[in-house]
Amino acid sequence: MKLMATRLVIITLLLLYFVNNSSAQKLNTTVLQSSNFCDTIPFEYANGKIIMNATIADRSARFILDTGAPFLLSDNLKNELKLNSTDLMDVTDVTGKSKQLAIVDVPQIAIGNIRFSDSRAIAYEKGMTGLMDCFNVEGLIGSTILKDCIVHIDTKQEIIILTDRIENTPVKNTTPIKMKLDENSRPFINLRVGKKSVIESLFDSGSDKLLPLSYTTFRRLEKEKEATVLNKGYGSISAGLFGSGKKGKEYRVAMETLQITNAIKIENVIATASEYKNKDAIGMGISQYGTVTIDYPGRKFYLNLYPAPPVKENKSFLGFHAQLSDGDFIISAVYDDSPASRAGVHIGQKISQINNIKINSLADICGVYLSGVVYEESIILTVIGQDGASKTLTLTGD
């Protein structure tokens, strides 16, 4: 079955956090307490992020469901619940930055009616994670929690089914893909690009993109004539646990097909590739085509297609990315020969206004980010350069 592909998301936030493999045994300790269970969990779907509630010590809090991460907990919630820090760990985020963070013991956690014990979480500093703060969450529910569950994600209905029996999910006539788990139980599947190229891809529900590629994979696909550069730029399009990513080459890439199973083929795929990204991932962009089921115990991945192909999204390519930096909304990347570059947008400029929305605070930045105003066909952008000069630019998408 052939399907249409989505266009590039202009402002992105990748929630792909990872720890050194040698420390995996410190985190992958969660014990599933429930058995013979099936629970339907509602969630809020905002900018490609699945935001759900979980309960720790009778305290309900909002978390992002992120299969590309272990269990993360904010220092605010850690201190509020007086959870013990028993160890330190060297943690490297998606940007390549590393720090020592505390490991926190979480004796009990519940998602809906499903209970887990003996979990361990990485405690991070809230307020240092850029646009993640816009979602008002206290951490990430990652694969170290979910590793003994079957997780069915339906973004149209905004529900998750958590169960231990595959027959409780609507995948009866769906062909599964073999899946493997790494040391932190993160799920990986093989995808076919074009006629012959195969990539091993993390399924990362914390990413709002369809297919962010590593630089190495992008170069291989280009050499194999399975990927073509649409736009080349410079800067950073990703942010991690410790802030903005390292500036480097950024690419907008076209691929004729992305094959997930023998029966599922997506045409005219637009992906991104970053010079300093070292993992391939398939994100929640895939959810426009169907529901996703991750069978952790059975090591199987399902994409259950919707009856009709998705409606092509009317998202323009304006050619820039923006990130939160030291309290300001900053141009973090610009693509060559794009509406942004032709209008005079440059890396490092501070965005002070978009259309009629003035940006004076974090609340304003979050409002712009969550509203999707930058996805419009045309926007009026007011930027301030390093010399303090302000200019107003009109950008119309390609």
Image (cartoon, rainbow, N blue to C red):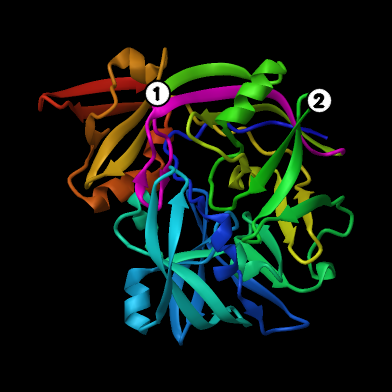
Mark 2 neighbour density, 10 Å: few (under 14) some (14–19) many (20 or more): few
The answer to whether residue 270 is visible is no
Q: Quadrant of residue 65?
A: bottom right
The answer to whether residue 393 is visible is yes
Q: Is residue 25 above or below residue 39?
A: above
The residue carrying mark 2 is: 196
Is-magenta flag for residue 69?
no
* Residues at marks 1 and 2 touching, judged by CB atoms closer than 8 Å: no
Mark 1 neighbour density, 10 Å: few (under 14) some (14–19) many (20 or more): some
Please state the horizontal and vertical placement of residue 116, each as a whole percent of the image.
61, 80
The residue carrying mark 1 is: 234
Of the pair 217 and 81, the residue shown nearer to us: 217
Q: Which residues are magenta?
A: 235-262
Q: Quadrant of residue 222?
A: top right
Please state the horizontal and vertical placement of residue 299, each as a whole percent of the image.
79, 59
Residue type (three-letter) at the residue carrying disc 1 = Tyr
Q: Report, in whole angstroms, how far the alpha carbon at label 1 lies from the one at label 2.
A: 30 Å
Q: Is residue 141 above or below residue 176?
A: below
